[in-house]
Image (cartoon, helix red, strand yellow):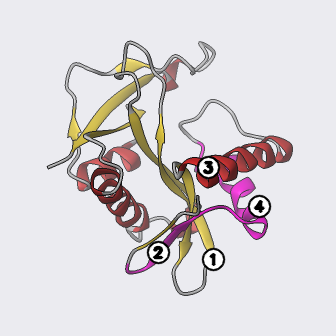
C-alpha cells in the first residue's frame, strides 16, 4: 500500500535507501533525542527504518519520511501509528509523532505535516481521536501540539512505561488529544 501525502511545502512518503543517513542522523543527534533515553546505533537505525518501511507499505500507518516537496530532500519524519499503552490510552489508539533534523527546526514543517496527517487520519481513515504525548519538559513538541489545536488532557499525565528508571527526568509525559469534528 503506497502512501504519499503532500502539503504546500512538504511530501510525506515511505522511506528510501537514500534517506538512510538522515534517518541515522535524527536518531543519534543529542538535541533531537534530548527527551529520549537512548541513541540508536547505525544497525539499530537501519533495522527501525526497515520496520517503518514495511509498516507503511502494508498498513499505510507509520512514521513517514518528511521531505521537501521541491527537492525531495528528507528532513525528518512525521506520522500516525497505532500505539499500545494499556491503562493510559484506549485499546487501538492512534498517536501522532515527529522528529526533525535540527537544521530544519523553526520553519513550521512539523506543524504543517502534522496538520495534514490529522486531516488524513480523520477524513481518510475515519479515526475519531488521535493522541500525542511528550516528556513534560519538551516545550518544542508541546508547542506543536498546541499550534495544532490539540487539547491537553488535564489529570492524564503519565509515567511512560517504556522509559527506564535510570532516566527519571524523562518518565513524566503530558497527554494531548485531537478529535474529529
Question: Could you tell me how far apart the alpha carbons at marks 2 and 3 are, in whole angstroms?
Answer: 22 Å
Asked whether the residues under the numbered discs 3 and 4 touch, taking CB atoms below 8 Å apart as contact, a structural biologist would say no
Disc with the residue nearer the chain's start (3 vs 4): 4
| Foreground of the two, 89 or 125 | 125
| Foreground of the two, 47 or 175 | 47
Residue 165 marker: none
Disc with the residue nearer the chain's start (4 vs 1): 4
**Marks 3, 4: nearer the viewer:** 3
Q: Where is mark 4, residue-wise? A: 20
Question: Could you tell me how far apart the alpha carbons at marks 4 and 2 are, in whole angstroms?
Answer: 19 Å
Disc with the residue nearer the chain's start (1 vs 3): 3
Residue 13 rendering spot, x and y as whole percentages: 57, 66
Secondary structure, mark 1, is loop
**Marks 1, 3: nearer the viewer:** 3
Residue 110 image-quadrant placement: bottom left
Residue 58 marker: 3
Residue 16 rendering spot, x and y as whole percentages: 72, 66
Q: Where is mark 1, residue-wise? A: 73
Neighbours of disc 1 within 10 Å: few (<14), some (14-19), many (20+): some
Residue 157 rendering spot, x and y as whole percentages: 31, 22
Q: Where is mark 2, residue-wise? A: 10
Asked whether the residues under the numbered discs 4 and 1 touch, taking CB atoms below 8 Å apart as contact, a structural biologist would say no
Q: Residue at x 38, y 57 (%)?
A: 117
Q: Which residues are magenta?
A: 8-33
| Foreground of the two, 14 or 39 | 14
**Marks 2, 3: nearer the viewer:** 3
Disc with the residue nearer the chain's start (2 vs 3): 2
Amino acid at each position: 500500500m503506497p502512501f504519499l501525502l503532500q502539503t504546500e511545502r512538504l511530501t510525506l512518503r515511505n522511506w528510501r535507501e537514500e534517506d538512510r543517513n538522515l534517518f541515522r542522523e535524527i536518531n543519534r543527534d543529542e538535541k533531537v533525542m534530548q527527551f529520549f533515553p537512548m541513541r540508536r546505533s547505525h544497525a539499530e537505525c537501519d533495522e527501525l527504518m526497515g520496520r517503518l518501511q514495511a509498516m507503511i507499505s502494508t498498513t499505510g500507518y507509520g512514521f513517514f519520511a518528511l521531505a521537501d516537496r521541491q527537492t525531495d530532500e528528507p528532513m525528518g519524519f512525521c506520522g500516525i501509528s497505532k500505539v499500545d499503552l494499556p491503562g493510559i490510552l484506549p485499546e487501538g489508539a492512534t498517536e501522532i509523532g515527529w522528529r526533525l533534523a535540527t537544521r530544519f527546526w523553526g520553519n513550521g514543517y512539523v506543524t504543517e505535516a502534522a496538520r495534514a496527517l490529522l486531516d488524513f487520519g480523520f477524513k481518510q481513515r475515519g479515526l475519531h481521536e488521535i493522541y500525542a504525548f511528550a516528556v513534560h519538559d519538551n516545550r518544542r513538541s508541546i508547542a506543536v501540539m498546541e499550534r495544532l489545536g490539540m487539547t491537553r488532557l488535564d489529570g492524564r499525565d503519565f509515567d511512560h512505561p517504556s522509559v527506564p528508571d535510570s532516566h527519571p527526568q524523562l518518565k513524566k509525559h503530558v497527554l494531548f488529544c485531537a478529535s474529529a469534528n
